[in-house]
Image (tube, helix red, strand yellow):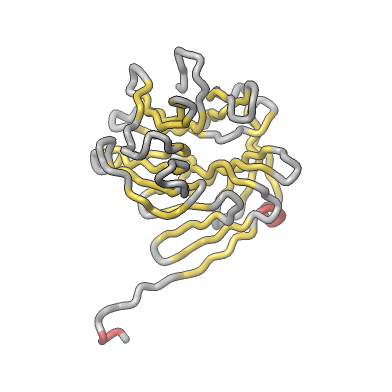
Amino acid sequence: MFTFNDSRYTHMPFAATGPDGDPEEFCCIPVNGLWKLYHFTGKRWKRVRTGLPDDAFECGPTAEFEDGMWKISFVAGGAKSARQFKLYRMLGFDADPMVQVAADVGFVWKDRVVHAGRRGPVTIIEPGRTVTLTLPGVEFLYRVSYDPFQPNRLLISGQLPGGEVFSWAYRSGMKILKEVIADGIPAYKCAFYEGNCYYAKREAGFEERRIVKAESLELNELPAEEHIVETEAFTHARHENPEFE
């Protein structure tokens, strides 16, 4: 998985089970210096045409095959006509992108919307409740994704105040936090598929990376309460029938 036949840099891997039961791959590849969404067709990497401006950055793809279509979410922005980064969702490759919320990182999975600004907090919106993850020791967030086989397992990449990059796997609700170390370094913007880890390995400059499969993998438990403050608020829709007032 995640093999490339040219020298282009690659970022933001994500894999999900397709309609035939095999994994299908998504990632970001630069076009004229701007990151764009791509999907592997089984034969080649094909660009996902989002319909957004040519000068927009597109990043952080996630996807699930449901109801006979690929439901794709991603973050995009930075275009002259639309500077603000937002979380989008597409119901099928040919669909128009739908804005979910202003965000620098995040994803949509079924009826769950997860989003954050560059400095957090991470907000998880589900029917009937909202969970907020405050990360007091984090300077920047670079990606928030999930494990397709364990959707409650958030994959968080970011930077600490000293400039150190981190990669965490966090189970909301259970408050279990683990550091993801691949080949001896934090697994930057990683993806998991059937236990295998794929991440964007740095080659030169900070964003000059290529997706590789981890040869070695460590999941080191961290004290969650020292790194993430999790709060939960329940929401209830107002019933329109006056009998229930």
Q: Is residue 242 above or below residue 20?
A: below
Locate residue 1, reporting x and y percent.
Answer: 45, 22
Residue at the spot 53% in from the left edge and 65% down from the top edge: 232
Residue 149 visible in the current orientation: no
Left or right relative to 216: residue 66:
left
Locate residue 155, reporting x and y percent.
Answer: 55, 42
Residue at the spot 64% in from the left edge and 54% down from the top edge: 135
Residue at the spot 59% in from the left edge and 29% down from the top edge: 207
Left or right relative to 46: residue 162:
right
Q: Quadrant of the C terminus?
A: bottom left
Residue 223 visible in the current orientation: yes
Which corner quadrant of the image does residue 160 belong to?
A: top right
Locate residue 105, reporting x and y percent.
Answer: 51, 46
Tell which residue pokes out farthest to the top in this image.
5
Residue placed most toward the observer, 186 or 162:
162
Left or right relative to 16: residue 230:
right
